[in-house]
Image (spheres, rainbow, N blue to C red):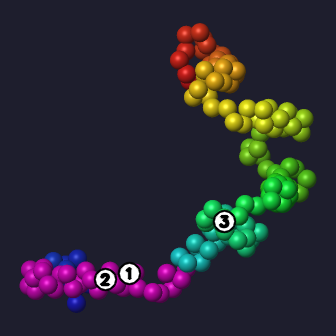
Amino acid sequence: MCDSKKKKQKCKKKKGIKRTLLWIGISAYQAYKPSGVSEELKNIKNKIRHGLIPEEIDKLERNEEIPQQGVDPKALLRQMQEWSNFEMAKWDGNKKIVSGAVYHGGKDLQQCMNEAYGLFSLSNPLHPDLFPYVRKMEAEIIAMSVSYFHGDPRQQCGL
């Protein structure tokens, strides 16, 4: 058999292309055949999956199609509140402290942002003729960002 580089070269010269292709095929099979390596890869994939997808999520039913009948809004909001509480417990500092994952200014600011979003949730900044105040807020946020980075908002175009 053609196990080393020298033998491989001899196979090419003496036995021709058929022998070389056979050697490549056998080598590839040995490298990728079901073995402890593939089992170890499977274990690694499972560890990564369980690290990224909590058990609570993994056991939930997946919605892969739009349901024929809608969900009751109150039931939907209750479910989403549970999900929010679960996620908040991961970063709020009571059970677990996480640095650099969530930036917020406290509950009062969060409530203000939620109400503000609700007021403009149906607006579309692509239509400033219909939503001029959304355009105004967008322009001001861009200007503030430019100023923050020591640019001149009156001379900059975007970020």
Q: In which quarter of the image is residue 24?
A: bottom left
Residue 79 position in % (x across, y down):
82, 60
Can residue 98 be seen by looking at this rendering? yes
Mark 3 belongs to which amino acid?
Gln
Residues marked 1 and 2 touching at CB (< 8 Å): yes
Question: Which of 126 and 84 lies nearest the eye of the viewer?
Answer: 126
Work out how far the residue at label 3 is from the one at label 1, CA to CA, in angstroms. 49 Å
Q: Quadrant of residue 7?
A: bottom left
Question: Which of 41 and 2 lies nearest the eye of the viewer?
Answer: 41
Residue carrying label 3:
68
- Seen at 9% across and 80% down, the residue is 13
Q: What element carries label 2?
A: helix
Work out how far the residue at label 1 is from the one at label 2, CA to CA, in angstroms. 6 Å
Residue carrying label 2:
27
Using the image, determine if residue 78 lies above or below residue 142. below
The kind of secondary structure the magenta stretch mainly shows is helix
Provide the residue span drawn in magenta. 12-40
Q: Which of marks 2 and 3 is nearer the N terminus?
A: 2
Work out how far the residue at label 2 is from the one at label 3, CA to CA, in angstroms. 53 Å
Q: In which quarter of the image is residue 47?
A: bottom right
Q: In which quarter of the image is the N terminus?
A: bottom left
